[in-house]
Amino acid sequence: MLAVPVATDKTHLLRDFQAAFDGFMEIIQPINRDPINSEDLCLQHPLYPEANSGKWHLGHALGWYWERFVLSKFSQGGYRSSNESIFNLYNYNSSHQVTDPLWSRNQHGWLRPRVDEVKNYVAEVRQRVIELLDSFDKQSQCWQYTVLPSIILGIQHIYQHQEMMLADLLLVSSCDPTPMVYAHLVKYCVPSQPIQANHLIRHRIEEGTYEVGSDAQGPPFIDSRFCWDNELSRHEQVVAECQIAQYLVTNRQYKKFIDDGGYGNPRYWSTRGFDFIQRNNIGAPLYWQADGSSWLLRSFAGIEALDPLQPVCNVSKYEAAAYASWVKKTGSAHGSLGTRLPTEVELEISAEHLHNFHGHVWQWTASPYALYPKHKAFQLAEMDEHNRNSDGTVVLRGSSMATPQKPSSTFRYLRHPATRTQFAGIRLAIDC
């Protein structure tokens, strides 16, 4: 799939907007269950500056974006929230480009407004967006070339923040010595792979020239297919012969790396990676907890025995690369002399042949992020957040159990190599 199908007619677009909004709110305020309490939605982890509070994700993705890029631009007479402090609090993006330097990024969880005020704000914004969509002539050029792209991007923006909010909620819940259980979020725990999964089964990529990247048209998305501008343009790349593991690396396999002293042996690590784990006293994936000779795992289900068949999750790119290096240098598990992380191109062209490429964990690649040849940025202010702060990032491919909408095989997810809060794991490649 080279692009994500999207609705471009008004009726179905309104349906998609409401579904995205409701899906996000179902996490915070589930139907027939107690809502996540306000205190939890204000928490931020002091050691992870990239993490945000649930309250911030709520106001930013369901309120601020729609006020800033839709209502204020297209409503007759403009629109501004009745609560100025709410708009200002969320008037910076997830790259933390702050408009008010007095508010540092690790403070917005406990600053006013209250959670109930933010919920009222996003409910008001939702209703105003619905009324705005109802008022537009879907045949007008204003609708097709200005309103439609902003709505489609806004829905995709909700999807991204929903997954980020889940990651941040799990992070802050892990700080509590008493296990915090969110029963309605257990579905976002990493699913196991089948016991018969054989990591020696690989997909072979023949040497050759392959087309990669999306072939969607971009804004105004009149072909009903969505992609981000960094997925364009479709172009050819030469790929050497190699093999990609059919299955993801499991907890059982990763535990062997730990048992072999992998975290303490610099020969498996890049200089920067080893310095990172040493400085931060890291000796296991983020939510693993030692229990004698065994391991426990923190998740939305609380603290449970580590499932050996689950794909390993919440590892940084440094850890993923060190594991691949360990397999290569020791011949352990399912490795050979050519074991490494795959490139993003290798994963894209083999995506349809791999087990659990989507819906389990994101997969780190060996590819630093760079724009494609003949890249042309979408000329939309809404894209600033997506394109900013990409320096030093690495590409991940696939999707996780927390990804609301299955992305295309061309989607490029960007994270810094030290990131551990992301639902990311490992798939190996082997040179032929």
Image (cartoon, rainbow, N blue to C red):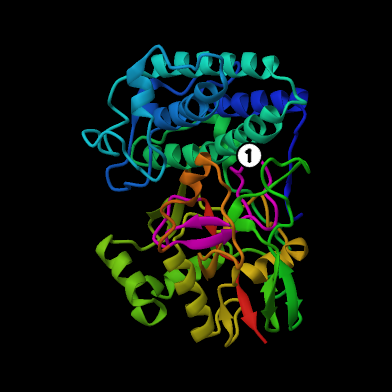
Q: Is residue 301 visible?
A: no
Residue at the image point whose x is 28% and y is 48% from the top: 47
- Residue 372, relative to residue 17: is it above or below? below
Residue at the image point whose x is 41% and y is 53% from the top: 389
Q: The N terminus is located in which quarter?
A: bottom right
In this rendering, position of residue 201 left or right of residue 388: right
Q: Main secondary structure of the magenta part?
A: loop
Q: Residue 90: say if magenta.
A: no
- Residue 208, relative to residue 186: is it above or below? below
Q: Nearer the viewer, residue 390 or 292?
A: 390
> Where residue 414 appears, x then y in whole percent?
50, 56
Q: Which residues are magenta?
A: 393-422
* Tag 1 secondary structure: loop
> Where residue 376 appears, x then y in whole percent?
59, 57
Q: Which residue is mark 1?
A: 404
Which three-letter amino acid code belongs to the residue tagged 1? Pro
